Amino acid sequence: MTANQPSRSKSEQLYEEALKHIVGGVNSPSRSFKAVGGGAPVFMKRGQGAYFWDEDGNRYIDYLAAYGPIILGHAHPAIAEALATAAASGTLFGTPTEWEIAFARKLKAAIPSLDKVRFVNSGTEAVMTTIRVARAYTGRAKIIKFAGCYHGHSDLVLVAAGSGPSTLGIPDSAGIPVSLAHEVITVPYNDSEALQAALERWGDDVAAVMIEPIVGNFGMVAPKPGYLEQLCRMTRDNGSLVIYDEVITGFRFHYGGAQNYSLFEDHAAIEPDLTALGKIIGGGLPIGAYGGRDEIMEQVAPLGPAYQAGTMAGNPASMLCGLACLDELAKPGVYEGMERLAIKLSDGISDLAAAAGIPMTVNRIGGAFSTHFCDHPVTNYEEAQDTDSEQFAAFFRGMLKQGICLAPSKYEAWFLTLAHREADIEETLIAVKNIFNMHTK
Ligand code: PLP
């Protein structure tokens, strides 16, 4: 194990400075180290491929991938070229461009449930608008969501569970009126009975059931066999819409949405009415998109009464980078390559944990996985919460010290990218072994 703690004095100085000017020193709370014992987060200066370097010159293997979008790795030449085109030809016109059409076509070809799409600037916007559209279409107000699924920071989805399916939500953040929280019902993931009970209780008031079809926000958690089929059937029987939040899962496991992924046999039975996308489809630039069936999307202005707009929406730089990213992902073998490395790494971690007598559950789907310090399966949020936070914090810090960057939260996934190589996996496994060996001493 690396004997000395690498110096991060510049990150520490920058953090002190940032605290004076940026609230909490970070522009997104997930970047702070609050959940892993506090202190200065690492300030990165540049990235290349699977690595980034901090302000002190330390190199890290990156499994954070910016919380998902950087699937090509850092500074990919195709993205650099797309950005150069946008820089040279104008970054914003406030008019339609041909690139928007090209991109919409590409998304529709990859995700057949999209008859029409609209581009926005973030996953938050995409999700927020699907809710508005579902409410406009159904004329109903309430939304059912699932405990532990994160859908961005718009008011309605920052609402936590009540104590059961017949209890309405309470705000999860200050600044959200209780009256608004009363429009949200939260039920456990992977539990069809709880959903059925909520639908029976709130029936005609439910505009939509919103779900991450494969969860990426309390680790990687797959739906139990048949769960999505049941969810879609029960929701439609109730006259409500199914919304998939594919902000993480879109183009993560294969070229398309989780809704078309080989994990599921009957794609027709699990197709949503509306889908929200973001992250990967921007190739590292700000983006979101939502779409769905024609008659539902026709609710959106200027065709219909549901308003949604955006000065930056569909901007040339995001469109060009998104198109370039999807072109790279469409090349043969790219997903198989990421999955192969993810299998090697996640199996390696499982084996090392078992050898060291450390209870660990590893959930892997395609090229992404999560590590949970616990001795039980993780199939819902409650089980993901019931894991050892201190052990994770020590693991996170031990990995960072050895130049391996994970997300500073026990609920986040490890993401493989096109840029990772066997040697990175081997280096990562040595780092894991060093930590687990210390544990057994
Ligand atoms: N939906 C899911 C599933 C997410 O994981 C996230 C962000 O992590 C969002 C929505 C919000 O996306 P953004 O951060 O781009 O607003």
Image (cartoon, rainbow, N blue to C red):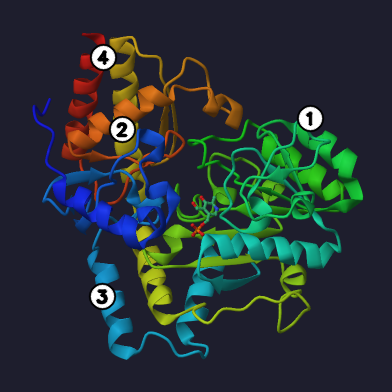
The numbered mark at residue 193 is: 1
Query: At which x and y percent is residue 381?
Result: 59, 32
Please tell me whether mark 4 sits on a helix, a strand or a loop.
helix
Residue drawn 37% across the image and 49% down it:
31
From the image, tell me which residue sits under label 4.
Answer: 439
Please tell me whether mark 1 sits on a helix, a strand or a loop.
helix
Q: Amino acid at mark 3?
A: Glu
Q: Amino acid at mark 1?
A: Glu
Query: At which x and y percent is residue 2?
Result: 10, 29
Alpha carbon of mark 3 to alpha carbon of mark 4: how far?
A: 46 Å
Q: Amino acid at mark 2?
A: Phe
Alpha carbon of mark 4 to alpha carbon of mark 2: how far?
A: 14 Å
From the image, tell me which residue sits under label 2.
Answer: 396
Please tell me whether mark 3 sits on a helix, a strand or a loop.
helix
| Residue 74 position (above or below residue 169) | below
Q: Across the whole image, how many numbered discs are drawn on residues?
A: 4
From the image, tell me which residue sits under label 3.
Answer: 81
Of marks 2 and 1, the one in the foreground: 2
Q: Amino acid at mark 4?
A: His
